[in-house]
Amino acid sequence: MNQNESIVILDFGSQYSQLIARRIRECGVFSKIVPFNIPAGELRDMRPSGIILSGGPASVYSKNAPVCDKKIFSLGIPILGICYGFQLLVHMLGGKVERSKSREYGRAELRSGTANAFLDGVSSLTTVWMSHGDKVLRLPDGFKPIAGTDNTEFAAAENSSTRTIGIQFHPEVAHTPEGIKMLRNFCLRTCGASGSWTMSSFIKKSIPEIRGKARDRNVILGLSGGVDSSVAAALIHKAIGRRLRPIFVNNGLLRKDEEKRVVEVFARNMKMPLKYVDASKRFLDRLKGVSDPERKRKIIGREFVKVFDAEAAKIRNAGFLAQGTTYPDVIESIPIGGNPSAMIKSHHNVGGLPKRMKLKLLEPLAQLFKDEVREVGRQLGLPDEIIMRQPFPGPGLGVRVVGEVRREYLDILKNADSIVVEEMKKSGLYYKTWQTFAVLLPVKTVGVMGDERTYDNVVALRAVDSSDGMTADWVRVPYDLLAKIANRIINEVDGVNRVVFDITSKPPGTIEWE
């Protein structure tokens, strides 16, 4: 893979910027999102194959409209402007943009004009997704229209001599069915990229990089059993073997038999020198009598760092702390100077880097999206049980036992949750659902089992779909499946006599109950 083959995306605050980056990678080209105000010289030094100006919520004629460095148009690098990005390049290069009398949102029919590389192989009449209230009224010198809609004469335009293209619609969304063809044409034909970015090429490139960075030092990794830390462990282990020193802390808040599965996969099957620490009693002692969700989270996070720090300090010749940080983590954690989308959240993988450890960070997955991380794991031989598993909260079952966390409550929840996962997998819905789990409620209700009255616990079932965890909708789990799960939990789990199903979306609710 040519390391210089990349498409750089200038982010003007579009909700689709990450989607653009993912679509470019589907074309076999590495992509990277950068601030819209990156200096042209810095962009030139990156030597990208092409540049994309993303969409955004602003109007180019607004007082505080985000504007890129005009010198990027003189770098000789192919440019694609999408929606706001198109209007911006028109505005900056001498064309005219004004508020449209007729706004265009949703589907539109795009009619191709003159033959061109960007629309090669695309139907002469194709559906595209529009989302704009402004309109290009006059193109800059050197630009010619290549497609239009009923409402937009200049829905697509190009300057073939400078290899600059502007489009008013969004090719990255699923509502533009031939959008991937257009993006592939831009990457491979206009930019001349080879399309050789694959996960096998990423692995091949990463292994010598990890070896070169680690040299003769040991690398410590906090292994949680989740997708990201597991794949990071597998990749680093392939590069430096037993100098990877993973630490797995059992905080007592894991899924049923989770610790056995992690030890089986990584210590026995993959022959890693895994350090297993059973700190479950310590965590439960600290949580005794605590019901407030935030206090529980802080206690769990603080104790994890203490346990992990103590174990890491025992490892000699340690130079690095490895984390399973992924590209969305990087994007969402760093304020992109002046970017309208700004910072979404702060990111911590293992509760922060203890200052006295004096280790450097090693984040081999920081360039990858989640689907790419899963593919790397698959190519490295990790089982689907690990690489396709659903997200699991950092505090574990500590935030799924509502109220005080006790060992007997955890036992009830673990058994109930394992039934939920087992039946969802049997139905084929588990890997199609973002998260499916059980919650133990801090209430007891009257029931009848056999000829006797009972006064036992309530378990809530939660099943949601989401693309990023920011918003979510509840899954319409088939009634027969819900009945089977509820029946098994009540019959097989001591201490439960009632099962309810949560049909709250996010917002107004959250995915987790605490």
Image (cartoon, rainbow, N blue to C red):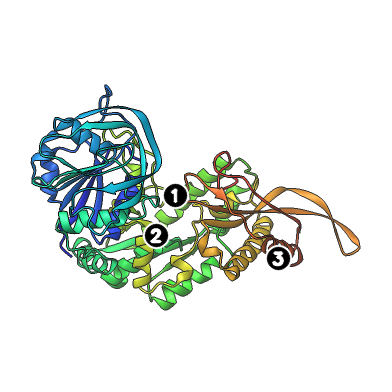
Q: Residue 325: in sight, yes or no?
A: yes
- Which of 347/126 is in front? 126
Dot 3 lies on which element? helix
In the rendered image, residue 252, in percent from the top left (x then y), is placed at 57, 59
**Local crowd size for mark 2, using a 10 Å CA cut-off: few (<14), some (14–19), many (≥20):** many
Q: Do the residues labelled 1 and 3 touch (CB within 8 Å)?
A: no
Amino acid of disc 3? Lys
Q: Which residue is drawn at 55% across and 60% down?
A: 254
Q: Give me the disc on residue 430.
A: none
Badge 3: few (under 14), some or many (20 or more) residues near its Cα, within 10 Å?
A: few
- Please tell me whether mark 2 sits on a helix, a strand or a loop: helix
Q: In this view, does 141 lie above or below 222?
A: above
Q: 225 or 124: nearer the eye? A: 124
N-terminal-most mark, 1 or 3: 1
Residue 109: image x %, image y %? Answer: 35, 46
How far apart are labels 2 and 3 at the CA level? 32 Å
* Structural distance between the alpha carbons of marks 1 and 2: 15 Å
Viewer-side label of 2, 3:
3
Q: What secondary structure is marked by label 1?
A: loop
Q: In this view, does 32 lie above or below 280?
A: above
Amino acid carrying label 2: it is Asp
Residue located beneath label 1 in the image: 468
The reply to whether residue 222 is visible in this rendering is no
Q: Which residue carries the number 3 mark? A: 484
Q: Where is residue 487 in the image (x, y as percent from the top left)?
A: 74, 64
